[in-house]
Image (cartoon, coloured by chain):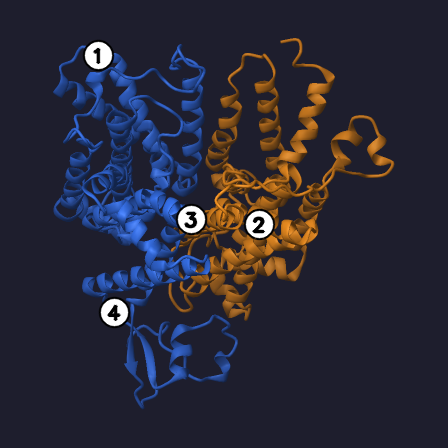
Chain colours: A orange, B blue
């Protein structure tokens, strides 16, 4: 028991928290933008998996991790384009379309992976030289804070920067406010001449691209590998974080950090001899999300038209 | 007046701001045909459209297989041989179809009422846990009663787990899509805890219970196949769901709630009660699925017994257009894909993951076909609207 509450273990938990939170934060922020336009994209898990693989295969073929990120964004964005066609143009039920594309994304990633890397019969497991941790000069030498905040991956810094950027976009720019207005009341926006469909397309594709990048953090920064179960439910967690954060960028950051912290703690618990059920910590985020749904119901930040397709002139 | 929104828009410059790609407009400009919205959709059309969508799926997947450098006919025949090529493989396909029929029905019945139960996976686990729990309580019961007790235990556990979402929905208006998704994870970690602690077999370090007593094993139809009584239960459940939805007053009410909640409420239907009942039935079906897999195949609780059966059930229900008989057919077809994919992978090198691509593409196209059914092509008239 005494071993667990040591300086190095606790510091390790905080360092890991930010690392674990990174893919969640990127995917959840993207999903926030998509959902702000009134489209619930349930396919985050599949999109992240496809992104993880698209990023991996691009990096492996070109030798460039940054091109890998681009590939991941393209893969995720392509799947989200299908989502936008289905939900905005054809106006299929969003839940159903999301589930269809979720399985399509998972299947495409596994199929592609197997066709590329096990074609000759033997399964060679390729590895890419993953992103290295980047120390911010000076700041990283601050004790504790430096190690926790300023010795992280590029993507972690980018993810953290996305929070104020997204907040600014959604709350202080014309396009962002219009996007949120579309999510709340598309009819009024239509009357004002805001192009609904193209904005929704853009938001959904952005969300998908971010989910792809979030997924590629796992393959290109965390492991340097791809394996079929690499996302392991993180897409669903990202979806939960958007709800937990009540559709607000700042609370989504808090949610990602909380979920990351719980995960990091349970990992440390499993590695230690502390006899505490780590499953409790794993289940806690989901219980908290349900609680947040119940408690926030009177001041819910959910877009009012979330999941409701817009037909001009119909109610 | 027909519905104004779905008509091809007149070539009016004032309407030029509408950036929504309009199917009708695109087609009408392309020739002398016009896309019109139908006021009614006919089941026959839906059936043909679904079949056409599945045929297009087969062609597209064939193209993908060809791209991977394998002859599509080779891949499909390997797939077919693995699924239905012999009596043994056909029976094994039915073994794999059994839980899918039940989770497919679970999704279908809920979706008919407009209740989006995405928690089939979790309710499947709840059902297996319920059946296991009952088996630990009522060991000495004679066989028929024992099975009834275990299945009832599984059904109740599945229904209770699903009811958390429906009670929250009715009481607080929380979105059931989101809560059922979250509950899947909660029960998985709950089971993980039980399997690492109270229920763990003392003989192994693995996360599993001890092998259950042989008298809890569901009887098999014949010696050479794993096909067990669960398959008969699944077929019975399909018939029961058909009668429930089409022939009972609850079925009438649930269809009404599914079409329009507000209208149903004005008609005097107690929407909340219907939602609770439907969710409980849906959860019970998924729970029976889990109980059947435990008692028919696995005989011990493990974390991997569901393997996506709850999620696949949702896809099956949607491809089957929420029709109970369709669920049985599609579940058997999907099970055939799963079962045949292994021999396809061995025989042709095409990854077994092709099955998931097929499922996704099939659902995608069936959804498009369902929308297409709501329109018809007409020769363009010379009249202005």
Q: Looking at the image, is mark 2 or mark 4 nearer the viewer?
A: 2
Q: Position of residue B309 (x, y in %)?
A: 34, 38
Between residues B73 and B120, which one lies in front from this camera angle? B73
Left or right, A5 with reference to B335: right
Disc 4 + disc 1, Cβ < 8 Å: no
Label 3 chain ID: B
Q: Chain of mark 4?
A: B
Q: Which residue is mark 1?
A: B139
Asked if badge 3 and badge 1 are on a common chain, one would say yes
Q: Which mark is residue A212?
A: 2
Pointer 2 chain? A
Task: Indicate which disc, 3 or 4, sits on the residue closer to the N terminus.
Answer: 4
Work out whether B300 lies above or below B161: above
In this rendering, the answer to whether A252 lies above or below B43 is: above
Residue designated by label 4: B39
Instruction: Give the x, y percent position of residue B377.
Output: 29, 77
Q: Which residue is mark 3?
A: B349
**Foreground: disc 2 or disc 3:** 3
As helix, strand or loop, the secondary structure at mark 3 comes to loop
Which of the 4 quarters of the picture holds residue B173?
top left
Secondary structure state at the residue bearing disc 1: loop
For the residues labelled 2 and 3, the Cα–Cα distance comes to 28 Å
Question: Is there one chain holding both mark 4 and mark 1?
Answer: yes
Q: Residue at x 25, y 35 (%)?
A: B285
Query: What crowding class fits label 1: few (fewer than 14 Cα within 10 Å), some (14-19), or many (20 or more)?
Result: few
């Amino acid at each position: 028991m005494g071993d667990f509450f040591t300086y190095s273990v606790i510091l390790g938990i905080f360092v890991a928290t930010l690392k674990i939170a990174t893919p969640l934060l990127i995917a959840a922020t993207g999903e926030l933008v998509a959902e702000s336009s009134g489209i619930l994209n349930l396919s985050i898990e599949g999109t992240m998996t496809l992104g993880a693989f698209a990023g991996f295969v691009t990096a492996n073929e070109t030798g460039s991790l940054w091109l890998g990120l681009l590939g991941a964004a393209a893969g995720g964005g392509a799947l989200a384009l299908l989502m936008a066609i289905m939900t905005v143009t054809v106006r299929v039920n969003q839940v159903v379309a999301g589930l269809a594309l979720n399985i399509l994304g998972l299947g495409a990633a596994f199929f592609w992976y197997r066709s590329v890397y096990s074609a000759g019969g033997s399964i060679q497991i390729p590895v890419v030289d993953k992103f290295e941790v980047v120390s911010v000069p000076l700041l990283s030498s601050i004790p504790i804070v430096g190690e926790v905040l300023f010795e992280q991956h590029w993507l972690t810094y980018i993810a953290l920067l996305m929070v104020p950027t997204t907040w600014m976009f959604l709350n202080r720019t014309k396009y962002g406010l219009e996007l949120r207005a579309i999510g709340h009341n598309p009819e009024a926006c239509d009357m004002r001449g805001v192009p609904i469909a193209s904005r929704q397309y853009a938001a959904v594709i952005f969300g998908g691209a971010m989910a792809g990048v979030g997924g590629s953090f796992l393959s290109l920064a965390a492991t340097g590998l791809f394996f079929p179960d690499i996302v392991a439910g993180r897409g669903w967690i990202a979806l939960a974080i958007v709800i937990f954060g009540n559709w607000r960028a700042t609370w989504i950051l808090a949610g990602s950090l909380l979920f990351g912290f719980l995960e990091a703690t349970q990992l440390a618990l499993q590695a230690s001899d502390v006899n505490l059920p780590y499953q409790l910590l794993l289940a806690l985020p989901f219980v908290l999300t349900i609680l947040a749904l119940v408690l926030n119901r009177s001041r819910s930040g959910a877009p009012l038209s979330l999941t409701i397709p817009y037909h001009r002139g119909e109610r | 007046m027909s519905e104004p929104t779905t008509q091809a828009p007149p070539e009016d410059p004032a309407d030029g701001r509408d950036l929504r790609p309009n199917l009708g407009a695109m087609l009408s400009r392309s020739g002398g045909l016009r896309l019109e919205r139908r006021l009614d959709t006919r089941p026959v059309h839906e059936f043909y459209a679904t079949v056409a969508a599945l045929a297009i799926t087969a062609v597209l997947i064939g193209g993908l297989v060809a791209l991977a450098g394998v002859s599509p006919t080779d891949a499909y025949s390997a797939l077919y041989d693995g699924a239905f090529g012999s009596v043994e493989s056909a029976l094994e396909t039915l073994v794999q179809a059994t839980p899918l029929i039940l989770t497919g029905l679970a999704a279908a019945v809920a979706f008919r009422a407009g209740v989006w139960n995405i928690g089939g996976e979790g309710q499947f686990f709840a059902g297996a846990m319920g059946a296991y729990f009952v088996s630990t309580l009522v060991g000495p019961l004679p066989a028929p009663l024992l099975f009834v007790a275990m299945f009832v235990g599984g059904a109740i556990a599945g229904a209770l787990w699903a009811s958390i979402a429906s009670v929250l929905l009715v009481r607080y208006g929380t979105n059931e899509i989101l809560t059922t998704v979250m509950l899947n994870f909660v029960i998985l970690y709950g089971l993980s805890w039980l399997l690492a602690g109270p229920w763990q077999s003392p003989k192994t370090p693995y996360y599993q219970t001890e092998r259950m007593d042989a008298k809890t094993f569901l009887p098999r139809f014949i010696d050479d196949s794993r096909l067990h009584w669960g398959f008969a239960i699944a077929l019975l459940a399909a018939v029961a769901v058909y009668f429930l939805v089409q022939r009972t007053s609850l079925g009438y009410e649930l269809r009404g709630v599914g079409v329009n909640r507000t209208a149903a409420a004005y008609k005097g239907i107690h929407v909340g009660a219907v939602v609770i009942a439907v969710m409980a039935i849906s959860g019970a079906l998924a729970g029976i699925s889990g109980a059947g897999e435990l008692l028919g195949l696995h005989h011990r609780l493990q974390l991997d017994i569901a393997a996506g059966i709850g999620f696949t059930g949702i896809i099956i229900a949607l491809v089957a257009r929420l029709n109970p008989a369709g669920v049985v057919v599609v579940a058997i077809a999907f099970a055939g894909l799963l079962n045949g994919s292994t021999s396809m992978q061995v025989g042709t090198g095409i990854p077994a993951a092709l099955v998931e691509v097929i499922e996704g593409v099939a659902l995608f196209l069936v959804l498009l076909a369902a929308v297409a059914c709501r329109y018809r092509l007409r020769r363009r008239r010379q009249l202005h609207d």
